[in-house]
Image (cartoon, rainbow, N blue to C red):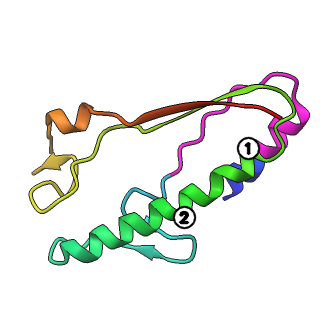
């Protein structure tokens, strides 16, 4: 949340800015704004619920940045990689070797032009 508060301050006080925020709440251990939840390979449904709750938490942070926009601003939201979530893909590696799966390269992306 501190990163989003800082981003809001920068956007209010700078004429031009490029901000990059890497929010780790959706990576394990998952963070829902209150508590960290470690990944448990024996409980896939719980892992899924914890990741969804972390995503919902992060989604609530974006309006903090967007609320005080004073001029047209391009906002791009993306990820650092695609997702390999599930019983066969608990992380990006197998026995210490990086797993190169096509799904890892399908990176989510959205953009919007924010207006005051």
Q: Secondary structure at mark 2?
A: helix
Q: Main secondary structure of the magenta part?
A: loop
Residue 29 found in image quarter: bottom left
Left or right, residue 7 beside residue 35:
right
* Residue occupying the point 56% across, 77% down: 34
Whether tag 1 and tag 2 are in contact, CB under 8 A, the answer is: no
* Residue 98 visible here: yes
Mark 1 or mark 2, earlier in chain: 2
> How far apart are the two marked residues, 1 and 2, measured between alpha carbons?
16 Å
Quadrant occupied by the C terminus: top right
Crowd class of label 1 (few under 14; some 14 to 19; many from 20; radius 10 Å): some
**x and y percentages locating residue 91 in the rendered image:** 22, 53
- From the viewer's perspective, is 73 left or right of 102? right
Task: Tell me which segment is drawn in magenta.
Answer: 8-23
Quarter of the view holding residue 15: top right
Which residue is the site of mark 1?
A: 66
* Image depth: mark 1 or mark 2 in front: 1
Pointer 2 residue:
57
Vertical comparison of 38 with 68: above or below: below
**Farthest top residue?**
16
Give coordinates of residue 51: x percent, y percent: 37, 64
Res 10 quadrant in image: top right
Count of marks placed on residues: 2
Considering every residue shown, the one lying at the far front of the view is 115
Q: Is residue 21 magenta?
A: yes
Q: Residue at x 17, y 71 (%)?
A: 41
Quick check: 80 above or below 25? above
Residue shown at 27%/33% (left/top)? 106
Compared across the picture, whether 16 is left or right of 51 comes to right
Badge 2 crowding class, 10 Å Cα cut-off, few under 14, some 14 to 19, many 20 or more, is: some
């Amino acid at each position: 949340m501190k990163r989003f508060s800082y981003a809001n301050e920068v956007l209010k006080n700078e004429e031009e800015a490029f901000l990059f925020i890497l929010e780790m709440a959706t990576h394990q251990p998952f963070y829902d704004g209150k508590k960290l939840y470690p990944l448990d390979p024996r409980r896939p449904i719980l892992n899924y619920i914890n990741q969804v709750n972390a995503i919902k938490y992060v989604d609530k942070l974006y309006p903090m940045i967007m609320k005080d926009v004073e001029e047209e601003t391009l906002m791009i939201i993306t990820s650092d990689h695609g997702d390999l979530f599930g019983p066969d893909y608990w992380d990006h590696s197998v026995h210490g070797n990086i797993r190169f799966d096509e799904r890892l390269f399908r990176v989510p992306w959205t953009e919007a032009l924010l207006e005051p």
